[in-house]
C-alpha cells in the first residue's frame, strides 16, 4: 500500500502537486516597512513575492505611505519602480520625503492596459524588489464621470505570479474599485487621518499626518487590527530639488515625442 501511495504521489508531482519542503520554501519572507506598528500588523513586514493593496482615494494617505516605502527601500540601496497611471507623482516632493531618485524607475502609461503591461515587464525583469502600481484616479471635475474599464482578473493573476517568481512585493494603490481582489495577500486601508500643525492661527505650519491603517482582509493568517502611523512633513521650507538624470520616466508606447525647437535669427544679406 505504501509503495502504491508513493508511486501515486510521484505521478502527481508532475501535475503541480507541492510537497512539504516546497511549501516551506514558498512561505514569504518579510521586509520592514519602516513603521514598527505596520510591521506588527503585517506579521513582520511586507511579504516578498506577494501583492499588497493600499485602498484609499485621491486625497487619502495611501500615496504618502507608498512614498515612505519607496524612500526606505531606495535609501537602503535597492532599486524600485513606480508605475504612475494617474500622472500624480512629483519628483521634487518625493525627493524631500527621502526617495533616492537615482534608484527609482518612473513609468507613466496613459492607459490602464499599458500600466498593467509596464508592471508585468518590470516584475519580470527581477531587478526591482519593490514595485508600486498607482491606479488611483485623480480628482474628477464636477459633473458626470466616466469610469475607466477595470483590469481583467487574468491580468491580476499574471501580475501575482510575476511577483512570486521575482520574490518582489507589488504594492497596488486603488480607490477601492478594480483592485487585485483575491490576488492580494492583504488589503490595507487608511481609516482615519489627521493633519498636525505647528503653532496657531492662519500662519501655522503643517507638521505632518497621523494615520490609522486597518487590515481589511488578508490571506496570511493574520488577525484583523489597526496600526497608528506618524508621518512628518518632508520640509517646512523646501528648497528647489532638480531630479537627477538617472531618474527614468518611461512614457506610454503611443505617446508623442517632444521635439525641441529653436528660433533662427535672421539677418539682412549684404
Image (tube, rainbow, N blue to C red):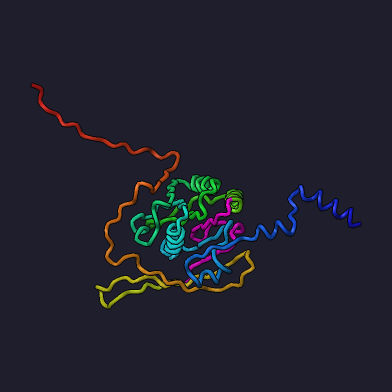
Q: Position of residue 177 (x, y in %)?
A: 52, 58
With respect to residue 72, does 200 lie above or below?
below
| Residue shown at 91% from the left, 57% from the top | 1
Q: Quadrant of residue 255?
A: top left
Residue 268 vs residue 233: left or right?
left
Q: Residue at x 43, y 65 (%)?
A: 61
Could one spot residue 139 in this view of the protein? Answer: no
Q: Give the extent of the magenta segment.
A: 166-191
Give coordinates of residue 251: x percent, y percent: 42, 43
Considering every residue shown, the one lying at the far right of the view is: 1
Q: Is residue 45 visible?
A: yes
Nearer-the-camera pick, 9 or 197: 9
Counting from the top left corner in percent of width and height, residue 99 is at 40, 58
* Residue pictured at 49% horizontal, 48% vertical: 115
- The answer to which quarter of the image holds residue 49 is bottom right
Left of 148 or right of it: where is 184? right
Q: With respect to residue 148, does 234 lie above or below?
A: below
Q: Quadrant of the C terminus?
A: top left
260 on left or right of 7: left
Give the side of residue 238 with respect to residue 6, left or right: left
Q: Pick the residue in front: 59 or 39.
A: 39
Q: Residue furthest front?
A: 77
Residue 167 vs residue 111, the one in the foreground: 167
> Residue, x 57% and y 56% (percent of image)?
180
Q: Does 216 appear above or below 129?
A: below
Residue lying farthest to the bottom in this orientation? 200
Residue 206 in picture, x, y percent from top left: 32, 70
In the image, residue 267 lies in the stretch drawn in magenta:
no
Residue that extends furthest to the top in the rendered view of this protein: 270
Amino acid at each position: 500500500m505504501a509503495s502504491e501511495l508513493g508511486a501515486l504521489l510521484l505521478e502527481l508531482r508532475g501535475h503541480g502537486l507541492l510537497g512539504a519542503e516546497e511549501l516551506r520554501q514558498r512561505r514569504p519572507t518579510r521586509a520592514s516597512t519602516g513603521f514598527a506598528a505596520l510591521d506588527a500588523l503585517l506579521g513582520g513586514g511586507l511579504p516578498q513575492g506577494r501583492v499588497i493593496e493600499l485602498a484609499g482615494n485621491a486625497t487619502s494617505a495611501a500615496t504618502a505611505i507608498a512614498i515612505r516605502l519607496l524612500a526606505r527601500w531606495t535609501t537602503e540601496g535597492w532599486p524600485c519602480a513606480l508605475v504612475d497611471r494617474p500622472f500624480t507623482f512629483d519628483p521634487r516632493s518625493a525627493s524631500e520625503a527621502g526617495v533616492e531618485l537615482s534608484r527609482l524607475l518612473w513609468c507613466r502609461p496613459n492607459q490602464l492596459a499599458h500600466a498593467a503591461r509596464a508592471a508585468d515587464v518590470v516584475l519580470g525583469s527581477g531587478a526591482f524588489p519593490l514595485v508600486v502600481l498607482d491606479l488611483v484616479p485623480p480628482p474628477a471635475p464636477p459633473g458626470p464621470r466616466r469610469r475607466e474599464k477595470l483590469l481583467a482578473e487574468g491580468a491580476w493573476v499574471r501580475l501575482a505570479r510575476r511577483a512570486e517568481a521575482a520574490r518582489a512585493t507589488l504594492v497596488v494603490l486603488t480607490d477601492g474599485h478594480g483592485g487585485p481582489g483575491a490576488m492580494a495577500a492583504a488589503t490595507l486601508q487608511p481609516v482615519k487621518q489627521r493633519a498636525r500643525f505647528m503653532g496657531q492661527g492662519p500662519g501655522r505650519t503643517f507638521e505632518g499626518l497621523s494615520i490609522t491603517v486597518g487590515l481589511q482582509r488578508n490571506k496570511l493568517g493574520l488577525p484583523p487590527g489597526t496600526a497608528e502611523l506618524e508621518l512628518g512633513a518632508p520640509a517646512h521650507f523646501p528648497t528647489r530639488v532638480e531630479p537627477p538624470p538617472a531618474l527614468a520616466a518611461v512614457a506610454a508606447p503611443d505617446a508623442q515625442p517632444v521635439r525641441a525647437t529653436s528660433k533662427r535669427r535672421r539677418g539682412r544679406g549684404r
